[in-house]
Image (cartoon, helix red, strand yellow):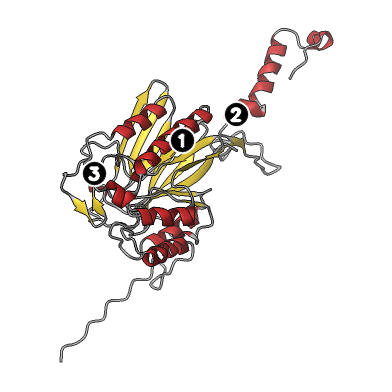
Amino acid sequence: MLNCEPRLLLRLRGIRCAIYFLIVFLFSPASFSADETKIAPSLPTNSNDRATPWTSLNALDSDNRFHFAVVTDRTGGERLGIFEPAMQTVNLLQPAFVVSVGDLIEGYTKNRVQLRKEWDELDSFVGQLDAPFFYTAGNHDYSNQVMADVWRERYGPSYYSFVYKDVLFVVLNSALFDRRGVSGHSQRRGDWGKEQAAQLAWLEETLAANDSVRWTFLLMHRPYWRLGWKRSKTETSTTGPWPRHTDIVPEWEVVEGLLQDRSYTAFAGHMHTYEYESTVVGPHQHEKIALATTGGISSLRGIEYGEFDHFVWVTMTEDAPILANVLLDGVLPKDLPMPLQRPYWIPAPEPQTREKD
C-alpha cells in the first residue's frame, strides 16, 4: 500500500500520486482474477521488441481450481472389456478424485459368494486408479437386504458427503426413494422407509451445515427429475415387485426444495442415455445430468441418440464447474502401438493378393 505522507506528496503531487496508486493496483497479485496465477517469462537479453510471443501471462490455474472425473453405469448388462480400460484412461488425466453414479456390479442376487466375487472384481478395477474413488449405490448394487448388508460390511454408509476446496459433494442412495407402502416391500428390502426418512433428515442437516460453499455436487443413481418415470403396477423383477413410479417422485421434490437456494450440479445414471438440463433460479444455476454408460448395456447408436461410452471431466473454477464428456476412445497414451508407422512421403505397400490356382 502507498503511504502518501506529506514529504512524498510534495514529490508526487496531484496526478502523479494517482498514477502511482494505479500502477500498484494493476501489478499487485490481488488485481488478478482469483482463478489466475502469473507466468514469469524470460526474454533474450538483446531483445528490444515491444511485441511478445504470448497472448497473456495469467495462467488459468489457482488454489481453488481442481479437476475430477465422473464414471457412470458399468452394469445392467455389462459389455466386457470397457470399464477396466476406462479406469486406465482416467488415470492418464490425473484427476484429484473419481466419483461414480452407481450400477457398479450386476448384483440382483442374495448369494453372498457371488456378491463378494463381483465386488472384488470391481475393486480390482478401481484399485488401478491413482486417485481416490467414491462409491454410489445403484439398483444393481443395492436391491435387497442381503445386498444392503454386504454394502455396509464393505463400504459402510450408503449415503454420505465430503467437502473439497469449499465445494460440497453429496452422495445419495436412490434405492431408498419411493419404496414405502410397496406390496412385498418388507420381505424384499426390510424397513427401508425409515432409512429413507433418515437419509432426507441427514441431507437437510448436511446442507444446512454447508450453506456457504461455492458449489454443490449431487451424486445418485436414478435421475428422479426426469419425467415419464413410470412402471406398470404388475411389472416385477428377479428381486421382487417394483413400486409404481409417478412422474415426479415425492422424495425428489423434497431434495429439490432443499437445494433450491444454492447452485448445484446433479449427476445420475440408470437410463443409459445422456440427457442434460439447466435452469437458473435467481442467482443460482441448477444443472441436472443423466449420464450414458461406462460399459453398461447400450445400443451405442451414437451421440445423436445419447448412447455412448464416456466419463465426465469436471473442471471446478472459482465461479462454476465446466463439464466435458470424454469418449473412451478419445484419450490415447503416449506409448501408442503403431506397427504400420512410416514417414508420410513413403507410400504404403500395396496389399498382396493371392494368385488363383
Dot 3 amino acid type = Pro
**Residue carrying label 3:** 243
The mark that comes first in sequence, 2 or 1, is 2
Alpha-carbon neighbours of circle 1 within 10 Å: few (<14), some, or many (≥20)?
A: some
> Of tags 2 and 3, which is closer to the observer?
3
Q: Which quadrant is home to the N terminus?
A: top right
Q: Is residue 293 left or right of residue 121?
A: left
What is the secondary structure assignment of the residue under circle 1? Answer: helix
Residue 228 can be seen in this image? yes
Q: Which quadrant is home to the C terminus?
A: bottom left
Alpha-carbon neighbours of circle 3 within 10 Å: few (<14), some, or many (≥20)?
A: many
Between 286 and 270, the one nearer to me in the picture: 270
Between 95 and 71, the one nearer to me in the picture: 71
**Residue carrying label 1:** 202
- x 39%, y 44%: residue: 173
**Residue carrying label 2:** 32
Q: Is residue 77 left or right of residue 260?
A: left
Q: Position of residue 140 (x, y in %)?
A: 33, 54
Dot 2 amino acid type = Phe
The total of numbered circles placed on residues is 3
Q: Position of residue 201 (x, y in %)?
A: 44, 33
- x 53%, y 36%: residue: 55
Alpha-carbon neighbours of circle 2 within 10 Å: few (<14), some, or many (≥20)?
A: some
Dot 1 amino acid type = Trp
What is the secondary structure assignment of the residue under circle 3? Answer: loop
Q: Is residue 75 left or right of residue 313?
A: left
